[in-house]
Amino acid sequence: MSASRVLVLNSGSSSVKYQLLDMRDSSRLAMGLVERIGEQSSRIRHTHVGNDDTREWNGPIADHDAALKAVSEELAKDGLGLDSPELAAIGHRVVHGGKTFTQPTVIDETVLAEIERLIPVAPLHNPANLTGIRTAQALRPDLPQVAVFDTAFHTTMPESAARYAIDVRTADEHRVRRYGFHGTSHAYVSRATAKLLGKAPEDVNVIVLHLGNGASASAVRGGRCVDTSMGLTPLEGLVMGTRSGDMDPAVIFHLARVGGMSIDEIDTLLNKKSGLVGLCGDNDMREIRRRVDEGDEEAKLAFDIYIHRLKKYIGAYYAVLGTVDAIAFTAGVGENAAAVREAAVAGLETLGLAVDGTLNAVRGDEPRLISPADARVKVAVVPTDEELEIATQTYALVGRY
């Protein structure tokens, strides 16, 4: 294929993140963010990586159509416009692909219809993803557009992990099952961890801990996901920045019957006012650790709850996998919060887990081991790169055509 560039688009409800990559060497040519779409105070921040040049522009951006046109204009200023013959494809992050989409997929009307059909199980994400796709199609109707699904990596889970223990007919009718999310990150990090160990992905069992404002864990056996912490939605699992993670589902009934709360109010509580922010008022781990160091008991309890849940999943996925070669920390908290990594494995020495204090304190942008040299289970910090993963999958797919 002569064209070697891939534009990656991540369209949110009021934002568009983008990166342009050259797949000959996986290098970034440009990246940026359009935010507050639909407001008078919209902003675009664009970086031309080759020239180390960053530009910002503020003003009204009415909709996603205007946002992508602004992106196209910024790229054109750097000689990287969407009309370039070197652009091979546009790769789109799509959050929910259900059971249907297990691989990156070239987008056509049938694919669009299925993404739309999945809106009820991803009401916050799939509509925005669809808008970004349709806008990009209008700008470059001749170019392959590829959907890369957050859920796809987790479709290898066995039914014993994916099924909830509720009436089967009801579950099937309403597509209630565990789908998992952050799949592009888990796929990238599990492979990068295997590489760090000098092994092939199929020869490694890895527990991946994607710890950001949203957080998820996965058990990856031989390159295939066999369990993950998020479920029907991204609400299940670990304690997150604003999401509760696991809890007794009867809490919802209790809040409705006794607390008089509506379904929408409970939804907002669990997704936006829970997790770390609900426990201590902060969802920034740096601020929480600062407060802990100053003796703040509320922040300490929030941190302890966060770590307790994390340890439960490490132990559970250790049991699911049977043998574990490595645990990989990734995403904003996982990559930067040494205190979280240390606390998460503290006391798990009998499982072969430990961190070296000196190695754990080192900051860096490259994958690295932070466990003692003789550790039975390696502990790694592996910076995630979801955009590169989307671009890689997109380019591999369009190269077959």
Image (spheres, grey):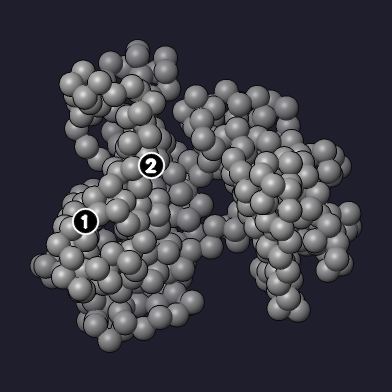
Would residue 29 appear left or right of 209 to someone viewing this image?
Answer: right
Image quarter of residue 1 = bottom right
* Residue for badge 2: 272
Query: In the figure, 214 relative to 290: above or below?
Result: above
- On the question of residue 237 being in view, the answer is no
Q: For this rendering, which residue is in front, 47 or 44?
A: 44
Residue depicted at x 33% and y 36%: 269
Secondary structure under tag 2 reads helix
Does 18 sit above or below residue 347? above
Cα separation, mark 2 vs mark 1, equals: 16 Å
Residue 141 in view:
yes
User: Looking at the image, which is closer to me, 277 or 84?
Assistant: 277
In terms of image quadrants, where is residue 199? Answer: bottom left
Q: Residue furthest front?
A: 40
Residue 131, image x, y percentages: 68, 36
Q: Mark 1 packing: few (<14 Cα in 10 Å), some, or many (20+)?
A: many
Q: Amino acid at mark 2?
A: Lys
Q: Which mark is residue 302?
A: 1
Residue type, label 1: Ala
228 and 191: which one is in front?
228
- Describe residue 367's horizontal placement relative to residue 387 as left or right: left
